[in-house]
Amino acid sequence: MNYPDDTIAAISTPVGQGGIGIVRISGPLSILIADKIFRPKGKDRLQTAKSHTMVYGHITDPSNILSLIDEVLVSVMLAPHSYTKEDVVEINCHGGMVSVRKILEIILTQGARLAEPGEFTKRAFLNGRISLSQAEAVLDLIQAKTDEGMKIALQQLQGGLSDKLLQTKDMLIETAALAEAHIDFPEDDIEPETVCAMKNRLIKIKQDAEQLSNTFEEARFFREGLSVAIVGRTNVGKSSLLNALLKKNRSIVTDIPGTTRDLIEDYINIQGLPIRIIDTAGLRKTDETVEKEGIKRTIDAVGNADFVIAVFDGSEPAQDEDAALIEKISGKNAVLAVNKSDLPVHISNTFIAGQGKPYLFLSARTGDGIEELKKCIFESNTKNWREDRDGIVVTNLRHKLALDKMCTALGRAITALHENRPLEIFSIEIREALDSIGEIMGSVTSEDILNRIFSTFCIGK
Ligand code: GDP
């Protein structure tokens, strides 16, 4: 891979007006370039500034020495103690668009190149400061939608996953070394106890990796959110329930059946879990075309949802449509919400309790039971999450797929040992498992994959 030796620059703050804007420069010429356009207020020149200090002064255009561009504070971070491990200069200027753009333009005329999206982080990776999975965590951190998503990204950034994989890598190398010793000296027969120990160790490594891979699904909810569909026949109180969950009057509540003709979506956050709630048209046999389309969409929404809240009217006996609904959600992760608990109960308890799904009684009108419903949504979808929360979590599909590939290779290695096949075959499988770890960490990753990962970053990061 080409080691970058040029100097890059970009605006690191978001586009728009703000209190300050930051232009960042990284590379061997960064101090020199910044010095050419900076006029310090005091005696401190950037070239002689200590690392991790700030210098106050003005930016001028070298082609017109009299022109003052902005009043700035410039921070200097010398290699290797910077984000990229290169010399980094950050110019903090006033946060209008003209000022930051103008400063960037001048820097680019002085020998720096405009950074590509994510290039600062890419350099941090190429210069060995962070692993690829840590670089990806930077992106997760920027994109985190909730506190929980941020916590997970931060843990990964601090090297949680990388450390764990390094341990696994060491164990695999040790195991491989045992085998290689016997390949090199085939006259010494390998002890059955050694084979047994190798096998047990691999089984444990594989189990751990599988567990890690399984955290992906739950963590995905924290990153991307969970889609929850509210379904039920008309007038059971779906829209009222949505409003109660959102605590606002979002969808139209009326006594006329079929008012919610389309899907209505909104977001809530339950204990850090971002949830997209979809209120659907009532499930009702109808000849009206518009409503038919709504009902078709409802059925799709149930199919696509991660979780379903099936709503029933507790003040009436269960109807055929209620039974039909139960059938429609049979394979889904769902809760039965028996609404209108403020009214006398007429729905049969056996009907509700006999469906093998969690259920609760609530009133969208008074708010009774809404908190329990939220708790139920959270718990049904995060199962062991609370206990595992401090553990390491896989949040990235690329990592999960590489882990799965590693487990498959380990499975084949275990079989090879089990069937007393030549150790060379075992060795090849272990190498493949090690390559999968390398893929996650970035040590055996093609330029193509790197470019794909970093191009999803914003410019200036
Ligand atoms: P949807 O068709 O399932 O979306 O039902 P709506 O939310 O439009 O509600 C239908 C009717 O039931 C409205 O008159 C609501 O005021 C009423 N309703 C909804 N929830 C409750 C509740 O918890 N208690 C009572 N008493 N009425 C409710």
Image (cartoon, rainbow, N blue to C red):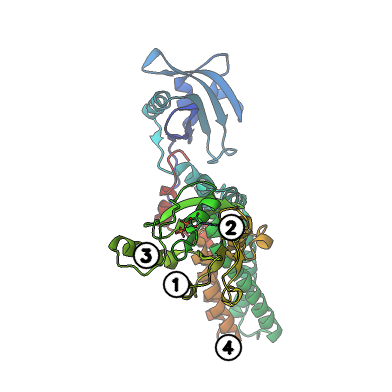
Callout 2–callout 1 Cβ contact below 8 Å: no
Q: Gap between marks 2 and 4, in whole Å?
A: 62 Å
Instruction: Tell me which label, 3 or 1, sits earlier in the chain.
Output: 3
Disc 1 + disc 4, Cβ < 8 Å: no
Q: Tell me if mark 3 has few (under 14), some (14-19) or many (20+) residues whose alpha carbon lies within 10 angstroms of its own.
A: many
Circles 4 and 3 in contact, beta carbons < 8 Å? no
Q: Which residue is mark 4?
A: 419
In space, the residues marked 3 and 1 are separated at their CA atoms by 13 Å
Farthest residue in the right direction?
A: 193
Q: Residue at x 41, y 39 (%)?
A: 115
Amino acid type of the residue that numbered disc 4 sits on in the rendered structure = Glu
Real-space CA distance between mark 1 and mark 4, rounded to the nearest whole angstrom: 57 Å
Disc 2 versus disc 3: nearer the observer = 2
Residue extending farthest left: 289
User: Marks 4 and 3, how far apart in space?
Assistant: 56 Å
**Mark 2 C-beta to ligand 1 under 8 Å:** yes
Label 4 neighbour load within 10 Å: few <14, some 14-19, many 20+: few
Disc 1 is placed on an element classified as helix
State the image coordinates of residue 390 (x, y, percent, origin top left). Answer: 67, 57
